[in-house]
Amino acid sequence: MQPVMCIAGQNLFPHDPVARFHLSNGASLHRIHWMADTSVKGRKESLGLMVNYMYELSRIDKNHEQYESRGKVVYSEAIAKLLG
């Protein structure tokens, strides 16, 4: 998973429109699920990965601002551990 996370972390904004929607609306990246969508389409579009987003009402505005102004994606401690 480490190489995928490194590649993903190099882009300022996500390619995926669903990710852009949630992140631009103030969600944080909460969990990553490996091999969650093993269909041909799922493997082609996202290497089988699926994610959960979390909306914390008290942080939505701050998360939105960080994402829109600096491209910063707020993520959980679990994601931080994956990134090393």
Image (spheres, helix red, strand yellow):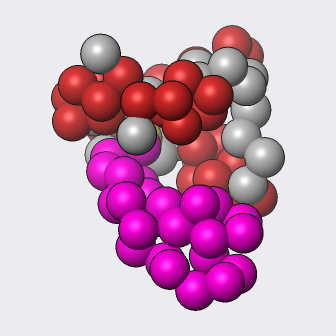
Magenta span contains residue 48: yes
The residue drawn where x is 76% and y is 58% is 17
Q: Quadrant of residue 42?
A: bottom right
Front position in the image: 55 or 72: 72
Image position, residue 41 (x, y; %): 70, 81
The residue drawn where x is 63% and y is 53% is 19
Magenta span contains residue 37: yes
Image position, residue 72 (x, y; %): 58, 20
Q: Does residue 62 appear left or right of residue 8 in this picture?
A: left
Front position in the image: 60 or 17: 17
65 above or below 16?
above
Q: Quadrant of the C terminus?
A: top left
Q: Does residue 63 appear left or right of residue 30 in this picture?
A: right
23 above or below 76?
below
15 above or below 4?
below
Front position in the image: 15 or 25: 15
Determine if residue 59 is in view.
Answer: no
Q: Quadrant of the N terminus?
A: top left
Image position, residue 21 (x, y; %): 68, 55
Tell me the magenta residue range. 29-54
Image position, residue 9 (x, y; %): 59, 24
The residue drawn where x is 32% and y is 47% is 30
